[in-house]
Amino acid sequence: MKKFYVTTAIYYVNAKPHIGHCSESISADALARYHRLKGEDVFFLTGTDEHGQKVAKAAFEAGKTPKEFVDSVVKPSLELWKLLAISYDDFIRTTDERHAEVVTFLLNDLHKKGELYESEYKGWYCSSCEAFWPKNQLEGNTCPECKRQLEEISETNWFFKLSKYQDWLVKYINEHPDFIKPGSRRNEILSFLSQPLQDLCISRPKSRLEWGITLPFSKDHVAYVWFDALVNYISGIGYLKDKQKFNKFWPADVHIVGKDIIRFHAVYWPIMLRAAGIELPNTVFAHGFWLIGKDAEKMSKSKGNVVDPFELINKYGPDPLRYFLLREVTYGLDGVYSEAALVSRLNTDLANDIGNLLNRTLTMIEKYYGGIIPAPAGTSLRSEDTMDDELKALAGGLAEKIDAAMAELDFAGALASIWELINRANKYIEVQAPWTLDKQGKKDRLSDVIYNLAEILRTVTIAVSPFIPASAEKMWEQIGMTEPLSGTRFPDIGKWGLVKPGTQIKKGAPLFPRIDTKAK
């Protein structure tokens, strides 16, 4: 069985998650569900990054110990992922003992290999990003990432010989075009590597920060939060503890991360792995930001413009939020969030398109056949068969289109292909006019049209299940399918005739009720 290993970045716990975090987790979940649908052995890892200066500061401000603080913040994250049906296989926390053991092992290993050395650091430090910046990468004394003021520090620390791997990494990226995606991020990293690479400071003195993993060879230092955090991708699949699992799933097929942390994942992480003698991940995919407001600003706690996902789920449900975040923007680019845009997607794509197709078809099955899906009669009227054939061909080619889009993490493109079929089916209803066929007594033709629509609903339900899983389960139940949706496989999408005539439907309330925008 083919394996597929996907990860999100582990989320920093200095504050509660917002829709930017939701977007990353939902996209990884959709990818994991899609590969499970293809019959692959999937491992989906997510988690939380719980060490570092920002966490220690947030804990102090909250009047809690760091451990008390991270426990309190992790809880709502787990609740949110449950609400959004995030189907992770493991949730790693950097405060887990299994993780600390791997970090300690790697630090010891690199130290023994001569990859680490102690030296005095003098330079610029961003406390917000918890990152050191060499002077040749600065314009003034503001952080290139968050634009906050940098502080100049001088202290003794441990360094990783990053610079010695610069030529190797440039060569590797050039020889592996799929290693960094999208292409714009690949170009960004190659541009970064065109300048001399500085060795990486991988420690913090305990005199400044105690909340972290102690270096095994220096009791006065803790590990730099990014060295600690990146290791989760191997500690979470059993490195040291479960050799069989690790050998099965590593290397990761894709790390999904935000564009603001691409440097850590596409420069530091591959060099760390190379030095440790561990194979590199296949792809690091950096998505864009969700922006907000008329000035399209990045969401940030300090600006007070973050959107609470719990409120949106309470108002509209989890699947409309999932659908919006996957469909609204091409993955990898920035997107502008507004509640009005979310409501528009709900009313147009979900209520008018897929919801309408489901409700109308089930209503006609009830009206004309007492809730029983009819057997097709096999009519041969040329003008009518032409549209039937077009509909069947579109359904038959859907899997190939979804495959092509998902290979590029183009969730919006995959959903657009599904909606092309949905919209064609709605047009099919208008053109074939089952109500007229019934009045004219064309029973054979009516049974063909209704059966074709039932088949389209089966096809669409399987196709949307990675993206809006809870809604897909309800659709599957309403169209009367008895085998579990989880037991279907991706090739079933393109097959015609799998709906059994005589199936009893279970029509319920409209799946996506329209939102009255005039009442707002």
Image (cartoon, rainbow, N blue to C red):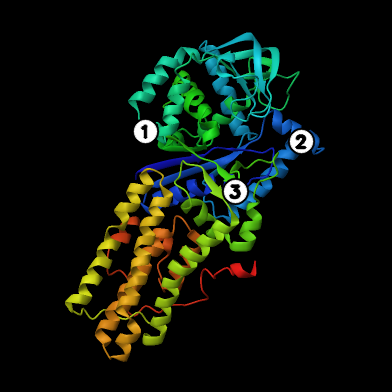
Q: Is mark 2 on a helix, strand or loop?
A: helix
Which three-letter amino acid code belongs to the residue tagged 1?
Asp
What residue did someone put label 1 on? 178
* Residue found at x 80% / y 36%: 61
Amino acid type, mark 2? Ala
Residue lying at the far right of the rendered structure: 63
Q: Earlier in the sequence, mark 2 or mark 3?
A: 3
Q: Please give the residue where the numbered disc 2 appears in the rendered image.
A: 59
Which quadrant is home to the N terminus? top left
Q: Quadrant of residue 356?
A: bottom left
Is label 3 in a helix, a strand or a loop?
helix
Residue displayed at 43% across by 51% down: 412
Q: Residue flagged by tag 3: what amino acid is it?
A: Ile
Up/down of 174 relative to 21, above or below: above
Quick one: SS at disc 1?
loop
Question: At 48% across and 52% down in the image, what residue appears?
Answer: 328
Mark closest to the chain's N terminus, 1 or 2? 2
Disc 3 crowd rating (10 Å Cα; few below 14, some 14-19, many 20+) is many
Answer yes or no: do the residues labelled 1 and 3 have beta carbons within 8 Å?
A: no
**Mark-to-mark CA distance, 2 and 3:** 23 Å
Quarter holding the C terminus? bottom right
Q: Where is residue 459 in the image (x, y as percent from the top left)?
A: 35, 64
**Towards the viewer: 370 or 145:** 145
Residue with the mark numbered 3: 19
Q: Is residue 278 left or right of residue 90?
A: left
Where does the image place residue 54, in percent across and percent down from the top left? 70, 31
Given residues 344 and 226, the one toward you in this image is 344
User: Of label 1 and label 3, which has the lower sequence position?
Assistant: 3
